[in-house]
Amino acid sequence: MSDRLVMSGIAKSFGATRALECVDLAVGAGASLALIGENGAGKSTLMKILTGAIRPDGGRMVLDGQPFAPHGPLDARNHGVAIVHQELAIAAELTVAENVLLGALPTRGGFTDLKKQRALAFAALDQLGCGELVDVRRAGDLPIAQQQLVEIARAIAAGPRLLVLDEPTSSLTAEDVQRLFTALRRLKAGGVSLIYISHFLEECRAIADRFAVIRDGRTISTGAMADVTETQIITAMVGREMADIYPRTPHTIGEPLLEVRGLQGRHKPRAADLTLRKGEVLGLFGLVGAGRSETLRTLFGLDQVTGGAVDLRGRPALRSTPRRRLAAGMGLLSENRKEEGLLLGRSIADNLTLTKLSPYVRAGLISGRRQRAAASGWMEKLGVKARDPAQAIGELSGGNQQKVAIARLLHHGTDLLLLDEPTRGIDVGAKAHVYRLIGELAASGAAIVVASSYLPELIGVCDTIAVMCRGRLGTARTVGEWGATPAEASHKILAAAIGQEE
Protein backbone atom coordinates (compact mmCIF):
# COMPACT_ATOMS: atom_id res chain seq x y z
CA MET A 1 0.00 0.00 0.00
CA SER A 2 1.42 3.39 -1.00
CA ASP A 3 1.66 6.18 1.53
CA ARG A 4 -0.95 8.93 1.32
CA LEU A 5 0.89 11.13 3.84
CA VAL A 6 4.42 11.14 5.20
CA MET A 7 5.52 13.60 7.90
CA SER A 8 9.25 13.58 8.68
CA GLY A 9 11.16 15.39 11.42
CA ILE A 10 8.38 17.92 12.11
CA ALA A 11 9.47 20.54 14.64
CA LYS A 12 7.77 23.64 16.07
CA SER A 13 8.59 26.10 18.85
CA PHE A 14 6.56 28.89 20.43
CA GLY A 15 9.14 31.19 21.94
CA ALA A 16 11.20 29.11 24.37
CA THR A 17 8.61 26.31 24.40
CA ARG A 18 9.37 23.33 22.15
CA ALA A 19 5.95 21.98 21.18
CA LEU A 20 7.35 19.49 18.65
CA GLU A 21 10.91 18.16 18.68
CA CYS A 22 10.92 15.51 15.95
CA VAL A 23 7.72 13.79 14.82
CA ASP A 24 7.57 11.16 12.10
CA LEU A 25 4.43 9.40 10.93
CA ALA A 26 2.93 7.91 7.80
CA VAL A 27 -0.60 6.99 6.69
CA GLY A 28 -1.34 4.72 3.76
CA ALA A 29 -3.97 5.37 1.10
CA GLY A 30 -7.30 4.03 2.36
CA ALA A 31 -5.74 3.28 5.75
CA SER A 32 -6.32 4.66 9.22
CA LEU A 33 -3.85 5.80 11.86
CA ALA A 34 -4.63 6.36 15.54
CA LEU A 35 -2.64 9.35 16.83
CA ILE A 36 -2.30 8.88 20.58
CA GLY A 37 -0.76 11.01 23.31
CA GLU A 38 -1.43 12.90 26.52
CA ASN A 39 -2.80 16.43 26.52
CA GLY A 40 0.13 18.68 25.75
CA ALA A 41 2.06 15.95 23.90
CA GLY A 42 1.88 17.94 20.66
CA LYS A 43 -1.01 16.29 18.79
CA SER A 44 -2.96 19.51 18.21
CA THR A 45 0.14 21.42 17.07
CA LEU A 46 0.98 18.61 14.64
CA MET A 47 -2.51 18.65 13.15
CA LYS A 48 -2.47 22.45 12.86
CA ILE A 49 0.70 22.09 10.78
CA LEU A 50 -0.89 19.39 8.63
CA THR A 51 -4.00 21.49 7.97
CA GLY A 52 -2.12 24.72 7.31
CA ALA A 53 -3.15 26.65 10.42
CA ILE A 54 0.51 27.15 11.41
CA ARG A 55 3.86 26.66 9.67
CA PRO A 56 6.49 24.23 11.03
CA ASP A 57 10.01 25.35 11.96
CA GLY A 58 11.48 22.20 10.45
CA GLY A 59 10.65 18.91 8.80
CA ARG A 60 8.93 17.83 5.60
CA MET A 61 5.49 16.66 4.51
CA VAL A 62 4.64 14.62 1.41
CA LEU A 63 1.05 14.09 0.22
CA ASP A 64 0.49 11.43 -2.47
CA GLY A 65 4.13 11.63 -3.50
CA GLN A 66 4.22 15.45 -3.79
CA PRO A 67 5.76 17.97 -1.37
CA PHE A 68 3.01 19.41 0.81
CA ALA A 69 3.27 22.78 2.60
CA PRO A 70 -0.21 24.35 2.78
CA HIS A 71 -0.43 28.14 3.06
CA GLY A 72 -3.58 27.95 5.19
CA PRO A 73 -6.59 25.77 6.06
CA LEU A 74 -8.35 26.56 2.77
CA ASP A 75 -5.24 25.55 0.80
CA ALA A 76 -5.06 22.28 2.77
CA ARG A 77 -8.75 21.65 2.10
CA ASN A 78 -8.24 22.29 -1.61
CA HIS A 79 -5.52 19.63 -1.52
CA GLY A 80 -7.98 17.16 0.02
CA VAL A 81 -7.08 17.46 3.73
CA ALA A 82 -10.07 18.01 6.05
CA ILE A 83 -10.31 18.08 9.84
CA VAL A 84 -13.00 17.71 12.49
CA HIS A 85 -11.86 19.70 15.53
CA GLN A 86 -12.54 18.67 19.12
CA GLU A 87 -13.88 22.12 19.97
CA LEU A 88 -17.09 22.81 18.04
CA ALA A 89 -17.09 25.60 15.46
CA ILE A 90 -20.76 25.78 14.54
CA ALA A 91 -22.13 28.97 12.98
CA ALA A 92 -25.09 29.06 15.34
CA GLU A 93 -27.32 31.43 13.35
CA LEU A 94 -26.96 29.57 10.05
CA THR A 95 -28.98 26.56 8.94
CA VAL A 96 -27.58 23.05 9.22
CA ALA A 97 -27.23 22.83 5.43
CA GLU A 98 -25.27 26.10 5.37
CA ASN A 99 -23.01 24.80 8.15
CA VAL A 100 -22.32 21.54 6.34
CA LEU A 101 -21.25 23.42 3.18
CA LEU A 102 -19.64 26.37 4.94
CA GLY A 103 -17.00 27.87 2.67
CA ALA A 104 -18.14 25.82 -0.32
CA LEU A 105 -21.76 26.84 -0.96
CA PRO A 106 -22.92 25.90 -4.50
CA THR A 107 -23.97 28.86 -6.61
CA ARG A 108 -25.93 29.48 -9.78
CA GLY A 109 -26.17 32.86 -11.45
CA GLY A 110 -24.35 34.51 -8.55
CA PHE A 111 -26.81 33.20 -5.94
CA THR A 112 -26.70 30.17 -3.65
CA ASP A 113 -28.21 27.12 -5.35
CA LEU A 114 -30.52 26.12 -2.49
CA LYS A 115 -31.68 22.89 -4.12
CA LYS A 116 -28.13 21.67 -4.71
CA GLN A 117 -27.08 22.91 -1.25
CA ARG A 118 -29.76 20.80 0.39
CA ALA A 119 -28.92 17.74 -1.72
CA LEU A 120 -25.20 17.90 -0.95
CA ALA A 121 -25.77 18.53 2.76
CA PHE A 122 -28.29 15.70 2.97
CA ALA A 123 -25.86 13.29 1.30
CA ALA A 124 -23.15 14.07 3.87
CA LEU A 125 -25.51 13.92 6.85
CA ASP A 126 -27.14 10.74 5.59
CA GLN A 127 -23.80 8.93 5.74
CA LEU A 128 -23.98 9.55 9.50
CA GLY A 129 -27.60 8.41 9.75
CA CYS A 130 -28.93 11.89 10.49
CA GLY A 131 -30.17 13.19 7.16
CA GLU A 132 -33.28 14.59 8.83
CA LEU A 133 -31.17 17.42 10.31
CA VAL A 134 -30.75 19.00 6.88
CA ASP A 135 -33.88 21.15 7.30
CA VAL A 136 -33.04 22.54 10.76
CA ARG A 137 -33.18 26.33 10.42
CA ARG A 138 -30.78 27.28 13.23
CA ALA A 139 -27.84 24.97 13.90
CA GLY A 140 -27.19 26.57 17.30
CA ASP A 141 -30.50 25.16 18.59
CA LEU A 142 -29.25 21.58 18.23
CA PRO A 143 -27.86 19.72 21.26
CA ILE A 144 -24.08 19.38 21.37
CA ALA A 145 -24.15 15.76 20.14
CA GLN A 146 -25.98 16.72 16.95
CA GLN A 147 -23.77 19.78 16.44
CA GLN A 148 -20.84 17.35 16.52
CA LEU A 149 -22.46 15.31 13.74
CA VAL A 150 -22.91 18.47 11.67
CA GLU A 151 -19.18 19.22 12.06
CA ILE A 152 -18.29 15.71 10.89
CA ALA A 153 -20.71 15.98 7.95
CA ARG A 154 -18.98 19.24 6.93
CA ALA A 155 -15.65 17.42 6.68
CA ILE A 156 -17.21 14.54 4.72
CA ALA A 157 -18.90 16.97 2.31
CA ALA A 158 -15.49 18.36 1.36
CA GLY A 159 -14.68 15.02 -0.32
CA PRO A 160 -11.30 14.63 1.41
CA ARG A 161 -8.41 12.36 0.50
CA LEU A 162 -7.21 12.59 4.11
CA LEU A 163 -9.64 13.13 6.99
CA VAL A 164 -8.43 14.07 10.49
CA LEU A 165 -10.82 13.49 13.39
CA ASP A 166 -9.89 15.00 16.76
CA GLU A 167 -11.96 13.42 19.58
CA PRO A 168 -15.00 13.10 17.26
CA THR A 169 -17.08 11.00 19.67
CA SER A 170 -16.65 13.06 22.85
CA SER A 171 -20.28 14.24 22.70
CA LEU A 172 -21.90 11.34 20.82
CA THR A 173 -24.18 8.58 22.01
CA ALA A 174 -23.16 4.95 21.57
CA GLU A 175 -25.59 4.69 18.65
CA ASP A 176 -24.12 7.79 16.97
CA VAL A 177 -20.60 6.40 17.45
CA GLN A 178 -21.52 3.22 15.60
CA ARG A 179 -23.04 5.27 12.77
CA LEU A 180 -19.86 7.32 12.57
CA PHE A 181 -17.68 4.21 12.47
CA THR A 182 -19.83 2.74 9.69
CA ALA A 183 -19.38 5.94 7.69
CA LEU A 184 -15.61 5.98 8.34
CA ARG A 185 -15.23 2.37 7.19
CA ARG A 186 -17.16 3.27 4.04
CA LEU A 187 -14.82 6.20 3.41
CA LYS A 188 -11.77 3.98 3.93
CA ALA A 189 -13.13 1.45 1.46
CA GLY A 190 -13.41 4.32 -1.02
CA GLY A 191 -9.72 5.18 -0.60
CA VAL A 192 -9.93 7.97 2.01
CA SER A 193 -7.16 7.94 4.61
CA LEU A 194 -7.94 8.67 8.27
CA ILE A 195 -6.00 10.10 11.20
CA TYR A 196 -8.05 9.35 14.31
CA ILE A 197 -7.24 11.16 17.57
CA SER A 198 -8.97 9.84 20.68
CA HIS A 199 -8.37 9.18 24.37
CA PHE A 200 -10.74 6.20 24.10
CA LEU A 201 -8.29 3.44 23.25
CA GLU A 202 -11.07 0.97 22.49
CA GLU A 203 -12.23 3.32 19.72
CA CYS A 204 -8.70 3.52 18.31
CA ARG A 205 -8.59 -0.27 18.20
CA ALA A 206 -12.00 -0.44 16.51
CA ILE A 207 -11.25 2.02 13.71
CA ALA A 208 -7.46 2.18 13.21
CA ASP A 209 -5.07 -0.14 11.38
CA ARG A 210 -1.92 1.39 12.86
CA PHE A 211 -0.99 3.71 15.72
CA ALA A 212 1.57 6.38 16.54
CA VAL A 213 2.24 7.55 20.10
CA ILE A 214 3.80 10.96 20.64
CA ARG A 215 5.09 12.25 23.97
CA ASP A 216 6.72 15.59 24.72
CA GLY A 217 6.76 16.48 21.03
CA ARG A 218 8.48 13.30 19.81
CA THR A 219 7.35 10.07 18.18
CA ILE A 220 7.73 7.39 20.84
CA SER A 221 6.16 4.29 19.30
CA THR A 222 4.46 3.18 16.08
CA GLY A 223 3.07 -0.13 14.86
CA ALA A 224 0.02 -2.19 14.03
CA MET A 225 -2.92 -1.89 16.45
CA ALA A 226 -3.30 -5.67 16.40
CA ASP A 227 0.23 -6.11 17.76
CA VAL A 228 -0.02 -3.94 20.88
CA THR A 229 -1.96 -4.06 24.14
CA GLU A 230 -3.69 -1.09 25.78
CA THR A 231 -1.25 -1.33 28.69
CA GLN A 232 1.68 -0.97 26.29
CA ILE A 233 0.08 2.06 24.63
CA ILE A 234 -0.65 3.74 27.97
CA THR A 235 2.92 3.12 29.16
CA ALA A 236 4.26 4.70 25.95
CA MET A 237 1.91 7.67 26.39
CA VAL A 238 2.79 8.55 29.96
CA GLY A 239 6.34 7.17 30.19
CA ARG A 240 5.55 5.01 33.18
CA GLU A 241 3.51 1.96 34.13
CA MET A 242 -0.21 2.58 34.69
CA ALA A 243 -1.12 -0.04 37.25
CA ASP A 244 -4.74 1.03 37.59
CA ILE A 245 -6.76 3.22 35.25
CA TYR A 246 -9.51 3.53 37.88
CA PRO A 247 -7.72 4.08 41.20
CA ARG A 248 -9.94 3.64 44.24
CA THR A 249 -9.39 5.58 47.46
CA PRO A 250 -11.09 4.03 50.52
CA HIS A 251 -13.87 6.28 51.78
CA THR A 252 -16.82 6.09 54.14
CA ILE A 253 -20.37 7.13 53.22
CA GLY A 254 -22.09 9.19 55.90
CA GLU A 255 -25.28 11.18 56.42
CA PRO A 256 -27.28 12.80 53.58
CA LEU A 257 -26.13 16.21 52.32
CA LEU A 258 -28.65 16.53 49.50
CA GLU A 259 -32.15 15.05 49.23
CA VAL A 260 -34.23 15.57 46.09
CA ARG A 261 -37.86 14.50 45.70
CA GLY A 262 -39.91 14.85 42.52
CA LEU A 263 -37.70 17.60 41.04
CA GLN A 264 -39.10 19.09 37.85
CA GLY A 265 -37.65 21.65 35.45
CA ARG A 266 -39.28 23.68 32.70
CA HIS A 267 -38.49 20.94 30.18
CA LYS A 268 -36.43 18.38 32.10
CA PRO A 269 -36.14 16.68 34.46
CA ARG A 270 -39.71 15.42 34.56
CA ALA A 271 -39.21 13.63 37.85
CA ALA A 272 -35.95 13.22 39.77
CA ASP A 273 -35.45 11.65 43.19
CA LEU A 274 -32.05 11.14 44.71
CA THR A 275 -30.20 11.15 48.01
CA LEU A 276 -26.53 12.14 48.03
CA ARG A 277 -24.55 11.37 51.14
CA LYS A 278 -21.29 12.62 52.60
CA GLY A 279 -18.38 10.72 51.10
CA GLU A 280 -20.49 9.26 48.27
CA VAL A 281 -19.69 9.25 44.54
CA LEU A 282 -22.98 8.93 42.69
CA GLY A 283 -22.94 8.30 38.94
CA LEU A 284 -25.62 9.72 36.65
CA PHE A 285 -26.05 7.94 33.32
CA GLY A 286 -28.43 8.48 30.45
CA LEU A 287 -28.54 8.80 26.69
CA VAL A 288 -28.09 12.23 25.10
CA GLY A 289 -31.30 14.18 25.68
CA ALA A 290 -32.39 12.10 28.67
CA GLY A 291 -31.98 15.06 31.02
CA ARG A 292 -28.70 14.49 32.90
CA SER A 293 -27.30 17.97 32.33
CA GLU A 294 -30.68 19.61 32.87
CA THR A 295 -31.00 17.89 36.25
CA LEU A 296 -27.63 19.21 37.41
CA ARG A 297 -28.33 22.70 36.06
CA THR A 298 -31.71 22.77 37.80
CA LEU A 299 -30.17 21.68 41.10
CA PHE A 300 -27.52 24.39 40.80
CA GLY A 301 -30.06 27.13 40.07
CA LEU A 302 -29.15 27.72 36.42
CA ASP A 303 -32.41 26.34 35.01
CA GLN A 304 -35.90 27.06 36.28
CA VAL A 305 -37.50 24.76 38.84
CA THR A 306 -41.20 24.04 38.35
CA GLY A 307 -41.85 21.51 41.11
CA GLY A 308 -40.56 19.09 43.69
CA ALA A 309 -38.53 19.45 46.87
CA VAL A 310 -34.82 19.90 47.59
CA ASP A 311 -33.24 19.68 51.04
CA LEU A 312 -29.63 20.85 51.27
CA ARG A 313 -27.84 20.05 54.52
CA GLY A 314 -31.18 19.34 56.16
CA ARG A 315 -32.84 22.62 55.13
CA PRO A 316 -35.41 23.24 52.36
CA ALA A 317 -33.67 24.82 49.35
CA LEU A 318 -35.79 24.21 46.27
CA ARG A 319 -35.38 27.51 44.44
CA SER A 320 -32.01 29.21 44.49
CA THR A 321 -29.34 30.91 42.40
CA PRO A 322 -25.83 29.75 41.46
CA ARG A 323 -24.37 32.38 43.79
CA ARG A 324 -26.34 31.03 46.75
CA ARG A 325 -25.52 27.45 45.82
CA LEU A 326 -21.80 28.28 45.77
CA ALA A 327 -22.14 30.00 49.13
CA ALA A 328 -23.79 26.82 50.43
CA GLY A 329 -20.85 24.70 49.26
CA MET A 330 -22.34 23.32 46.01
CA GLY A 331 -20.38 23.63 42.76
CA LEU A 332 -21.19 22.72 39.15
CA LEU A 333 -18.71 21.75 36.44
CA SER A 334 -20.39 22.38 33.07
CA GLU A 335 -19.96 19.92 30.20
CA ASN A 336 -19.47 22.92 27.88
CA ARG A 337 -16.26 24.42 29.23
CA LYS A 338 -15.69 26.56 26.11
CA GLU A 339 -18.92 28.58 26.38
CA GLU A 340 -19.98 28.15 30.02
CA GLY A 341 -16.99 27.04 32.06
CA LEU A 342 -14.12 29.38 31.24
CA LEU A 343 -13.12 32.88 30.19
CA LEU A 344 -10.78 31.83 27.40
CA GLY A 345 -9.16 35.25 26.99
CA ARG A 346 -8.26 35.60 30.68
CA SER A 347 -5.37 34.07 32.60
CA ILE A 348 -5.33 30.74 34.40
CA ALA A 349 -5.12 32.62 37.71
CA ASP A 350 -8.21 34.69 36.91
CA ASN A 351 -10.23 31.65 35.85
CA LEU A 352 -9.19 29.64 38.87
CA THR A 353 -9.96 32.29 41.49
CA LEU A 354 -12.76 34.37 39.95
CA THR A 355 -15.54 32.99 42.18
CA LYS A 356 -13.54 33.65 45.34
CA LEU A 357 -11.30 36.70 45.11
CA SER A 358 -11.68 37.96 48.69
CA PRO A 359 -8.40 36.39 49.98
CA TYR A 360 -6.43 38.48 47.47
CA VAL A 361 -8.13 41.86 47.89
CA ARG A 362 -6.39 44.61 49.86
CA ALA A 363 -7.83 48.16 50.01
CA GLY A 364 -10.14 47.36 47.15
CA LEU A 365 -7.36 46.08 44.86
CA ILE A 366 -6.54 42.52 43.85
CA SER A 367 -3.03 41.36 44.71
CA GLY A 368 -1.88 39.63 41.54
CA ARG A 369 1.07 38.09 43.36
CA ARG A 370 -1.13 36.38 45.97
CA GLN A 371 -3.61 35.34 43.31
CA ARG A 372 -0.91 33.74 41.14
CA ALA A 373 0.67 32.02 44.13
CA ALA A 374 -2.65 30.40 45.03
CA ALA A 375 -3.24 29.39 41.41
CA SER A 376 0.25 27.83 41.23
CA GLY A 377 -0.60 25.59 44.18
CA TRP A 378 -3.74 24.29 42.54
CA MET A 379 -1.99 23.87 39.19
CA GLU A 380 0.66 21.71 40.85
CA LYS A 381 -1.92 19.65 42.71
CA LEU A 382 -3.96 18.92 39.59
CA GLY A 383 -1.00 18.58 37.24
CA VAL A 384 -1.91 21.49 34.95
CA LYS A 385 0.66 21.83 32.16
CA ALA A 386 1.24 25.53 31.43
CA ARG A 387 4.00 28.13 31.43
CA ASP A 388 2.71 29.93 34.52
CA PRO A 389 -0.56 31.15 36.09
CA ALA A 390 -0.49 34.30 33.94
CA GLN A 391 -0.86 32.34 30.69
CA ALA A 392 -4.20 32.76 28.89
CA ILE A 393 -6.30 29.68 29.53
CA GLY A 394 -7.42 29.61 25.90
CA GLU A 395 -3.85 28.62 24.96
CA LEU A 396 -4.02 25.38 26.98
CA SER A 397 -5.11 21.98 25.74
CA GLY A 398 -8.70 20.95 26.44
CA GLY A 399 -7.62 18.58 29.20
CA ASN A 400 -5.65 21.23 31.04
CA GLN A 401 -8.54 23.67 30.69
CA GLN A 402 -10.80 21.07 32.33
CA LYS A 403 -8.38 20.66 35.23
CA VAL A 404 -8.48 24.42 35.87
CA ALA A 405 -12.30 24.35 35.83
CA ILE A 406 -12.25 21.60 38.48
CA ALA A 407 -9.62 23.45 40.49
CA ARG A 408 -11.89 26.51 40.64
CA LEU A 409 -14.57 24.49 42.45
CA LEU A 410 -12.03 23.16 44.92
CA HIS A 411 -10.56 26.64 45.44
CA HIS A 412 -14.03 27.89 46.30
CA GLY A 413 -14.27 25.28 49.05
CA THR A 414 -17.21 23.29 47.67
CA ASP A 415 -17.84 19.91 49.25
CA LEU A 416 -20.87 19.01 47.14
CA LEU A 417 -19.76 18.77 43.54
CA LEU A 418 -21.93 18.28 40.44
CA LEU A 419 -19.51 17.17 37.71
CA ASP A 420 -20.96 17.02 34.17
CA GLU A 421 -18.66 14.98 31.88
CA PRO A 422 -15.58 15.77 34.02
CA THR A 423 -13.13 13.83 31.82
CA ARG A 424 -14.37 14.95 28.40
CA GLY A 425 -11.34 15.57 26.20
CA ILE A 426 -8.82 14.40 28.83
CA ASP A 427 -6.17 11.77 28.11
CA VAL A 428 -5.82 8.46 29.96
CA GLY A 429 -3.14 9.66 32.37
CA ALA A 430 -5.08 12.82 33.23
CA LYS A 431 -8.28 10.81 33.65
CA ALA A 432 -6.60 8.61 36.24
CA HIS A 433 -5.50 11.81 38.01
CA VAL A 434 -9.08 13.12 38.05
CA TYR A 435 -10.45 9.77 39.23
CA ARG A 436 -7.89 9.72 42.05
CA LEU A 437 -8.87 13.28 42.97
CA ILE A 438 -12.56 12.31 43.08
CA GLY A 439 -11.71 9.44 45.43
CA GLU A 440 -9.63 11.71 47.66
CA LEU A 441 -12.44 14.26 47.83
CA ALA A 442 -14.90 11.52 48.81
CA ALA A 443 -12.46 10.32 51.48
CA SER A 444 -12.39 13.86 52.88
CA GLY A 445 -16.19 13.81 53.19
CA ALA A 446 -17.21 15.53 49.96
CA ALA A 447 -20.33 14.35 48.14
CA ILE A 448 -19.98 14.07 44.36
CA VAL A 449 -22.31 13.51 41.42
CA VAL A 450 -20.56 12.40 38.22
CA ALA A 451 -22.74 12.67 35.10
CA SER A 452 -21.08 10.81 32.24
CA SER A 453 -21.87 9.12 28.93
CA TYR A 454 -18.87 6.81 29.41
CA LEU A 455 -20.05 3.76 31.35
CA PRO A 456 -16.62 2.25 32.17
CA GLU A 457 -15.66 5.31 34.22
CA LEU A 458 -18.96 5.34 36.14
CA ILE A 459 -18.62 1.65 36.96
CA GLY A 460 -14.94 2.09 37.84
CA VAL A 461 -15.24 5.22 39.98
CA CYS A 462 -18.73 5.50 41.51
CA ASP A 463 -20.27 3.93 44.60
CA THR A 464 -23.82 4.12 43.23
CA ILE A 465 -25.31 4.75 39.77
CA ALA A 466 -28.72 6.15 38.84
CA VAL A 467 -30.07 6.12 35.28
CA MET A 468 -32.13 8.77 33.50
CA CYS A 469 -34.63 7.79 30.83
CA ARG A 470 -36.80 10.37 29.05
CA GLY A 471 -36.38 12.92 31.81
CA ARG A 472 -37.06 10.56 34.71
CA LEU A 473 -34.35 9.51 37.16
CA GLY A 474 -34.44 5.92 38.35
CA THR A 475 -33.42 4.61 41.76
CA ALA A 476 -29.71 4.68 42.53
CA ARG A 477 -28.12 1.28 43.07
CA THR A 478 -24.65 0.23 44.10
CA VAL A 479 -22.40 -0.88 41.26
CA GLY A 480 -22.58 -4.42 42.64
CA GLU A 481 -26.38 -4.34 42.50
CA TRP A 482 -26.25 -3.39 38.82
CA GLY A 483 -24.14 -6.45 38.02
CA ALA A 484 -21.54 -8.89 39.30
CA THR A 485 -19.17 -7.94 36.46
CA PRO A 486 -18.59 -4.66 34.55
CA ALA A 487 -20.09 -6.27 31.43
CA GLU A 488 -23.25 -7.33 33.26
CA ALA A 489 -23.58 -3.94 34.94
CA SER A 490 -23.13 -2.15 31.60
CA HIS A 491 -25.83 -4.26 29.98
CA LYS A 492 -28.37 -3.56 32.72
CA ILE A 493 -27.57 0.15 32.90
CA LEU A 494 -27.96 0.53 29.12
CA ALA A 495 -31.25 -1.39 29.26
CA ALA A 496 -32.51 1.05 31.89
CA ALA A 497 -31.34 4.01 29.80
CA ILE A 498 -33.43 2.93 26.80
CA GLY A 499 -36.45 2.04 28.92
CA GLN A 500 -36.10 -1.74 28.62
CA GLU A 501 -35.06 -2.52 32.19
CA GLU A 502 -36.46 -5.79 33.44
Image (cartoon, helix red, strand yellow):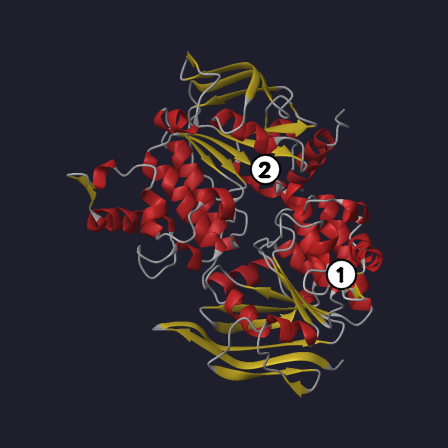
Residue 333 seen by the camera: yes
In which quadrant is the C terminus drawn?
Answer: top right
Q: Nearer the viewer, residue 220 or 369?
A: 369
First-in-chain label (1 vs 2): 1
Would you identify the image quadrant in which residue 153 lies? bottom right
498 sits left or right of 468 in the view: right
Element marked by disc 1: helix
Which residue is labeled 2 in the image? 459
Element marked by disc 2: helix
177 sits left or right of 381 in the view: right
In this view, the residue farthest toward the left is 363
Real-space Cα separation, disc 1 to disc 2, in angstroms: 29 Å
Residue positioned 52% across, 35% down in the render:
450
Residue 284 seen by the camera: no
Which residue is labeled 1 in the image? 184
Q: Is residue 364 above or below residue 3?
A: above
Q: Is residue 321 above or below residue 332?
A: above
- Give the mark toward the camera: 1 or 2: 1
Q: Amino acid at mark 1?
A: Leu
In this view, the residue farthest toward the bottom is 66
- Image coords of residue 339 (percent x, y): 51, 45
- Image coords of residue 69 (percent x, y): 59, 82
